[in-house]
Amino acid sequence: MNAALFIIIATIAGALVLGLLARRGIRMDIEQWSVGGRSFGPVFMFVLMAGEVFTTFTFLGGGGYAYAHGVAALYMVAYTALGFMLSYWLLPPIWRIGRAHGLLTQADFFRVRYDSTPLALLVAAVGLVSMVPYLVLQFKGLGIIVQATSYGLLSPALSVWIGAGVMCVYVVVSGMHGSAWTATVKDVMVLAVVAFLGLYMPWHYYGGIGPMFARLARERPEMLVLSPTGYSPAWFCSTILVSGLGLYMWPHTFGSALSAHAARSFRVNAALMPLYTLVMILAMMVGFAAIDQVPGLTGGQIDMALLRLSIQTFPSWFVGLIGAAGLLAAIVPGSMMLIATATLVANNIFGVLCARNDPARVGWIARAMVPVITLVAVWFTLDGSISIVNLLIMGYSFVTQLFPALLASLSPRRIATTAGAAGGICAGVGVVMATVITHSSMATLFPALPAWARDINTGCLALGLNVLIMLAVSQVSLLRRPALRSSGQ
């Protein structure tokens, strides 16, 4: 056993022990299990929300995207900062409503605000379809990281099974409390490792960040500007908008907002968390450094830029630390996704059918669903014939379609009716599905548009139609009600 493998195995064992210890002294009912008993203060809320946003996609994708597309990768920094800023106003009222009504899930919130169980089922369905590919991505990233940093001693399949098993056990036992404890360790490790790599790699290979970019400006100037077409300013801005609005629409990020002890936690975090996006920039520095040092990576290999450069630079023990940080970057958000998905299934599907007034039964079903969902995600992960790229893109665009109806529900006056909210969500989701399945873009749908407009993210088209349908149907519904009352119906 080399040093890297020993460190990775020790980290897996430590994560399991820490996750199990988190439930000590807590009566683990469904509220404690799914939203931590609404008891987390600013520190735990910070690490939970950071743990959800900074996943294996960030750990691998930040450097890989910079390696392949240059400064276009900065959209990740911009959209997360936008999402954090919006959370200052968005999350406190959500928390107050959730606490007042004892809500557990995103679908519960829509049920209460629109007084509609069918709408809650629609929201739950959108969340479930979106969450599965996101969870699969965590497992795939885990397999890639552990195989590379263990120098091939652990296969991707074995790594996925071990990581999934650890995650499943402590989620069933400790729920959100286990995720919060392991998120604390994960954030410290990821911050330390990525900060070191982002500063050391440019210095080691180029003499500093400035000389690295000076060399890129001479040899690869196209990496330092947005393209006139494709990854253009229009693509950049529209993708930031769609992704930023959807940041807290994922069921697991929305659910974490229900875990806080006080609304003030969100405002403190909204001020601090944009600084945390510097971690992404440092990961991108490694990608820029790898352009000349690890040339020739294409396709899915670009996500290996950070790992390949690290393996050729450091001794095995330090590579093991990188692998441990990447492992936790998969396990922590993955555990939160498991909790949110299992609670959605138990509370908003089974609960509607047979256990609405029985929290104990909902809690039992939620725990029972965790291994089922884990096995489904592992199956998709290990089935190499199934591509999740389109599903992941569709998943992010799916959850963003919930934003207009959510925002309308927070207005002091009635903006959207139940029919309008449902119609808007269905219209937006339908556009997303159609464009993903047919591989359409603004350029193929509207070839007569100006060149800059053809690069706009199609998610903006779906959102625009969503808002129009929501407002139009709501207006018709509101006009129809007085007519029905006046006719005696």
Image (tube, rainbow, N blue to C red):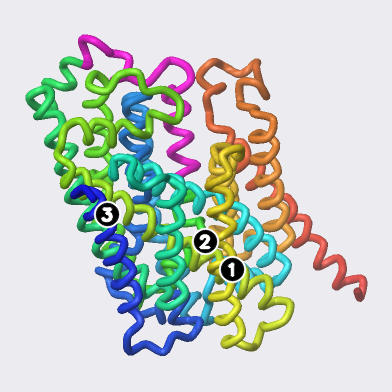
Left or right of 359 on screen, residue 201: left
Please give the name of the residue rendered at 67% of the width and 83% of the height, measured from the top-left corner.
355
Is residue 231 shown in magenta? yes
Disc 1 crowd, CA 10 A, few/some/many (<14, 14-19, 20+): many
Left or right of 211 on screen, residue 344: right
Q: Which mark is residue 344?
A: 1
Q: Is residue 471 visible?
A: no
Please give the name of the residue rendered at 47% of the width and 69% of the height, measured from the top-left corner.
94
Which mark's residue is nearer the viewer, 3 or 2?
3
Q: Determine whether label 3 and label 1 are within 8 Å by CB.
A: no
Along the line of sight, the residue nearer the viewer: 284 or 160: 160
Left or right of 227 on screen, residue 461: right
Q: Is residue 260 visible?
A: yes
Say which residue label 2 marks: 251
Q: Quadrant of residue 435?
A: top right
Provide the residue span drawn in magenta: 216-243
Say which residue label 3 marks: 8
Query: Mark 1 or mark 2, which has the lower sequence index?
Result: 2
Query: Mark 3 or mark 1, which has the lower sequence index?
Result: 3
Estimate the x, y position of residue 37 in percent, counting from the top left. 41, 81
Classify mark 3: helix, strand or loop: helix
Q: CA distance from mark 1 to mark 2?
A: 8 Å
Tell me: residue 35, above or below residue 333: below
Disc 2 crowd, CA 10 A, few/some/many (<14, 14-19, 20+): many
Along the line of sight, the residue nearer the viewer: 251 or 300: 300
Residue at far front of view: 1
Q: CA distance from mark 3 to mark 2?
A: 30 Å
Q: Determine whether label 1 and label 2 are within 8 Å by CB.
A: yes
